[in-house]
Each structure stands twice: as structure tokens, then as C-alpha cells.
Image: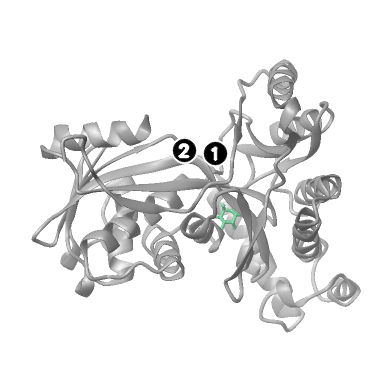
Amino acid sequence: MTREAAIELFGIRFGGVPEYVVRSPGRVNLIGEHTDYNDGFVFPMAIEQSTWLALRGRDDNQVHVASIGHRDAQFDIAKVVKGTSGWAEYLKGLAWAIGPDALRGWEGAFATDIPTGAGLSSSAALGIAGARAFAAVSDWVWDAKTAARAARRSENEWIGVNTGIMDQLVIATGEAGHAVLIDCRSLELHTFLLPADVTVVILDTGTRRQSVSSEYDDRRASCARAAEAANVSALRDLSLESLPMLASAVDSVTLRRARHVISENTRTVEAAAALGIGDIDRFGEYMGGSHRSLRDDYEVSSTELDAMVEIASNVEGCHGARMTGAGFGGCAVALVDKTAVCGFVEEVGQRYAKATSHNPRIYATTPTAGACVDRFVTDAS
Ligand code: GLA
């Protein structure tokens, strides 16, 4: 549906048919939260919910973009300046991060079914869609890690949001049916097949928070302080045995932040190994441990996320649940027996709405391939 919406909007705004159609998925992180900017481990997967971009190359340096519900935007690749084009700034920042020399212009229409502000990485999906588009029409050659680095740089330095590399990298490299263990220091990737009898369920609390960016920066600063006090380049280099030493060098809040990151790194690697041998119950226990650590030590959960995780964890067929993404609102994620999913979705939805008076959106998803581009072929061609 979203693909067709992008193609239709392309026809309306630019006339004719597109040359290429890009699909760039959202992502959900199964475990490994707030570890990526500490050079640690994350275990996300690309999801079905995606941003679609129908586009055609141009003979000049202009990028013209349209998107349902937003004003059209236009910029010159060779002369990008920071502006107030909202969502299109991500594309400008990308052109700036890649550099104008190898790029050519294009015109394209976007449509998406990734909810914004939900912790499912709609902005990283937009950036990686842009990278696929530039690679399709230019001499710039697609390389997933280079694209992820450029999209991240655009978010960090053009938009001013200090994210890690997880979102861009899994969106660029995801594999159908698999979750991806990422070493955020080396960018080494290991894929793990999700067992056929379980389903990943996204549990949107229906809440969004405004202050995520400043809270996120605050947590990053705590991690940097702790790493500096321990004389290591990142918290990735510490084990739980370092905590007593750290306790004498930092305040108690910084110590708890560091404890989350250090314990989460271990949990993530062990959880991936458990999934690798099909031990879903153990994986679910690690998810629970991750949530408690994010709630109590890192303090990035919320009343609604806690309620959702508590309710989901106690419904038949659920192996484990936790908040996912930056936190403070948005989504939780659960691993649920395939045969129990329908009942799970209904029961968790009812109980959560009753407990919080918020309207949740709960849906199953599957791990999908990362961003891809196809030549557009009409029935007539
Ligand atoms: C956001 C950021 C990621 C990561 C998560 C927390 O999604 O974009 O880089 O830091 O928060 O794990």
C-alpha cells in the first residue's frame, strides 16, 4: 500500500512513472539498548514497516522531494545550507555528508508506515532511503556501512541529534528472517535466524515524549564521564568487576548509568548466543533483565512502558518483553509464541488500555531485508 502511495504521489507531483523504487525499513531493537554509543553490542532487526521512495534521476544537481502530509522541498546538492525544510533536512545533510562530487540530482516521492517518535527509527529509514536513491542515480557506489556512517553523520552534525550507529546500520544491512548482532566498535555483523515458532510483537504505548534528545545527551555525557574516570576509551572496555573501582571515582548516578551499559553489553552477547541455540526462554529472561536495568539504572523507561512490559510479560505465550529504542515513551517489544499471538495482542491491548487510559497499537512484525532499490517496471513495459 505504502509503495503504491509513493508511486502515485510521484505521478501527481512529477508526472509519468519513476525510474526506481526504494524500500527502507524501520527497525526494532531486541536487546542492547544505549550501548551503541559506548562502542558496545546491539541486537536489532529490520522490520516490515517501511519508508518507500519512488524516484527518477535528473540531469542536474537538484533534489526535489514530495511526501504525503508535508510541504515539498528542493535543494541543490552542490550548495546545501542548513535550513528549516523539516524532514528534507535529513536528505540535505546526507548529500553534505557524502560530498557533492559523485552525486547527481533526483526527484522523488516518499510514503511511510513507520510511526514517528515511536522508537522505530523513521528518521534513519529516511536517511538510508536517500542514500539508496543517490547510489541509484549517481556514480556514488552503494556500500551499506559507508551509507550508514553518512546517514548517521547527517543526523549528528546536520540535524544535531547525537545518535549512535545502530539504527542506520541495521536498516542498511538487515537480513530477512534474521536479527543482527552488531559490534558497534568494529561494525562487524553476525546474523541470527529467528526460530520459526516465535513472533516479534511491537507494543506501541501510544505515548511520545518531547525531551528525549536532551535526556539522551545527558546519558551520553554520564557514559563519557565514567569512561574517562576509568581511563578507557569507551564503557565497552569495562567488565562488572570494574564497578568497585569506578565507585570511588564517580557519583552514584554515573555509576548506575555505567552499570547499565556494562551489564547490557554482556546480556546482549549472551542473549544472541541463546537465540542461536534456540533457547527462547533464556532470551526472554535477558529481555526482562535489560528492561529492569533500563528502568532502574539508566532511568530511560516511563510509567507506560513499565506497565506495557509488566502486562505483556504475564500474558500466555510471551517469552520476554522490554522497552525498545531511546525510551521515555514509544514502543516495547515482546517475543511471543506464534500460536499465541492473536490472543496476546488482544489481551495485552485491553489490559494496557484499562491500566493507563492510553490507546496502544500492538502488532506482529517479521525481520526483513535491509534497504533495497528496484528498477520500476510497469505492466506495460
Ligand atoms: C536511539 C539512537 C540509537 C541508540 C538507541 C538506544 O534509537 O538512535 O543510536 O542509541 O536510541 O539504544
Q: Disc 1 vs disc 2: which is toward the camera?
A: 2
Amino acid type shown at disc 1: Ala
- Which sits in the foreground, 322 or 243? 322
Indicate the position of residue 311 as horizontal and vertical percent values: 79, 28
- Tell whether 55 sits left or right of 352: left
Kindly identify which numbered label has been placed on residue 118. Answer: 1
Residue with the mark numbered 2: 114
- Which sits in the foreground, 257 or 339? 339
Indicate the position of residue 190 as horizontal and vertical percent values: 64, 65
State the residue at coordinates (83%, 74%).
246
**Alpha carbon distance from label 1 to label 2:** 8 Å
State the residue at coordinates (58%, 59%).
217
Q: Quadrant of residue 149?
A: bottom left
User: Is 96 rendered above or below residue 128?
Assistant: below
- Split into quadrants, the picture shows ligand 1 in the one at bottom right
State the residue at coordinates (45%, 45%).
122
State the residue at coordinates (91%, 73%).
244
Q: Quadrant of residue 187?
A: bottom right
Amino acid type shown at disc 2: Ile
- Which sits in the foreground, 260 or 105? 105
- Tell whether 72 sits left or right of 260: left
Task: State yes or no: discs 1 and 2 in contact (Cβ < 8 Å).
Answer: yes
Count of labels in the image = 2
Question: What secondary structure is found at the residue carrying circle 2?
Answer: loop
- Which sits in the foreground, 235 or 228? 235
Indicate the position of residue 251 as horizontal and vertical percent values: 80, 66
Q: Quadrant of residue 261?
A: bottom right
Kindly identify which numbered label has been placed on residue 25. Answer: none
Instruction: Answer yes or no: is residue 381 visible.
Output: yes
Does mark 1 have its CB less than 8 Å from ligand 1? no
Question: What secondary structure is found at the residue carrying circle 1?
Answer: loop
User: Is 251 rendered above or below residue 281?
Assistant: below
